[in-house]
Image (cartoon, rainbow, N blue to C red):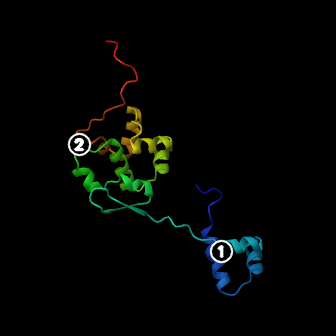
Amino acid sequence: MPSGRKPNLQRRRLVLKLRARGFTLSEIARRFDITKQAVWSLLNQRPRLTSARAVACTTCGAQIVSAGALPRDAETALCLDCLHKADDVSFAQRLKALRLAAGLSQADLAKRTRLAPGSLRAYEDGARQPRRATVGRLVRVFGAGLLGRDGAFAARRPCYRDAS
């Protein structure tokens, strides 16, 4: 995740206009009370592309366009149509499909739900099952569709064995 101050886009636009009108770096620097190096940096910074990425649905092959899509999501990604048509969809696949449909990255979802990003990844990979309280946090973001058609959720099995 990038760190530092957010770019001042208005200042960058003004610097670009002045440069297009033939002002030197020194003249622009004096107008804005910054160094020539800062002007050069404003002129040469590349705008960040935050465009959506796409992964293919594993069932129908349709492109799922989402800002939160990653290449590793392509292995088990489902579009919403296939999610609703399928009978036996795991919690992990439902979670990933709804996250992609909402355009959220795992980090964004982690911030919204106050969960660890590693936990969300484990839930989406099917390596772990969340607790009921965690499922409640996720349902607040995605709604009851996360629980499946019957609305039931198989919670983690207890860590103890029956004494019988």
Residue hosting label 1: 44
Query: Circle 2: is it few (<14), some (14-19), or many (20+) Cα within 10 Å?
Result: few
Name the quadrant containing residue 29.
bottom right
- 57, above or below 151, in the image: below
Q: Is residue 86 visible?
A: yes
Name the quadrant containing residue 141.
top left
**Mark 2 is on which residue type?**
Arg
Residue hosting label 2: 149
**Mark 1 is on which residue type?**
Asn
Q: Nearer the viewer, residue 162 or 27?
A: 162
Report whether 90 appears left or right of 45. Answer: left
Number of the label disc, if any, that sits on residue 158: none
- 113, above or below 162, in the image: below
Name the quadrant containing residue 157.
top left
Could you say where residue 61 lies in the image, as x and y percent from the top left? Answer: 30, 61
**Residue at point 63%, 81% (across, down):** 17
Query: Circle 1: is it few (<14), some (14-19), or many (20+) Cα within 10 Å?
Result: few
**Residue at point 26%, 59% (across, down):** 60
**Residue at point 52%, 67% (across, down):** 49
> Where the N terminus falls, by quadrant?
bottom right
The kind of secondary structure element at disc 2 is loop
Could you say where residue 136 lies in the image, as x and y percent from the top left? Answer: 38, 37
Report whether 150 appears left or right of 99. Answer: left
The kind of secondary structure element at disc 1 is helix
